Amino acid sequence: MTSNNIILVGMMATGKSTVGAILAEELGYELVDLDHVIAESEDRSIPEIFAEEGEGYFRRLESETLERMLQGEKRVISTGGGAVLAAGNAELMLANGLVVALTADEEEILARVSENLDRPLLAGNAKERIARIMEERRDAYRFAHCTVDTTGLTAVEVSQHILMHQRG
Ligand code: S3P
């Protein structure tokens, strides 16, 4: 690994954005929330992009934005849960920073997403969809350098685990 970036990957609602903000503050790094960068560049929300352009368009934008953001240094990059899916993105992340996967058990994810309905892939029956997506992505986050199970932990505790990994 040649770069000092930290890249957070993992299922929706595992705390990537919240933990990313704490890490960036703690390290004095730039915070890059990929979904925010995409929404800003498009001047519309993620649900709007999905509804108006479809998932394929969003995924292309996500991969392009990820590649661009990985070119910097001293960044904490929080990715959307599906950013690991496109071919090549995992290798790109591994080559450009410390990749940390956040996990949580299904009940905790369901409890957390119920507070925020801004996730187009969960529209309808969130419980069923989460179960299906978790099954589909069972191995998708295994490529990370390290994994933190966030179940029952606060975002500050998760950040402390990651800083320990980073400092070796
Ligand atoms: C997605 C996760 C979302 C967002 C989009 C698709 C996914 O980000 O990128 O709704 O495919 O898992 P979060 O992981 O921050 O919820």
Image: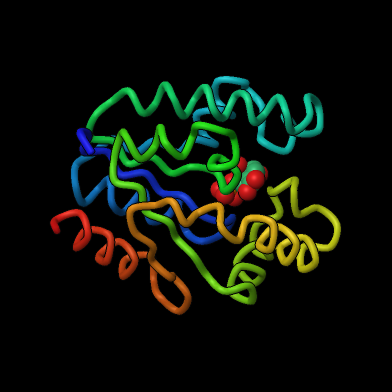
Q: Residue at x 22, y 60 (%)?
A: 165
List x then y, in percent, for residue 90. Answer: 46, 39
Left/right placement of residue 72 relative to residue 121 reads left
Left/right placement of residue 120 relative to residue 2 reads right
> Residue 155, located in which quarter of the rendered image?
bottom left
List x then y, in percent, for residue 131. Answer: 73, 67
Q: Quadrant location of the N terminus?
A: top left
Q: Residue at x 19, y 47 (%)?
A: 27
The furthest residue to the left? 167
Q: How is the image coloured?
A: rainbow
Q: Which residue is drawn at 25% across and 65% down?
A: 160
Q: Residue 19 or 96: which is nearer the viewer?
A: 96
List x then y, in percent, for residue 91. Answer: 42, 36
The furthest residue to the right? 124
Q: Quadrant location of the C terminus?
A: bottom left
Q: Which residue is drawn at 56% across and 58% down?
A: 139
Left/right placement of residue 135 relative to residue 83 reads right
**Labels in figure, total:** 0
List x then y, in percent, for residue 128. Answer: 80, 66
> Residue 125, located in which quarter of the rendered image?
bottom right
Does 130 appear above or below 20? below
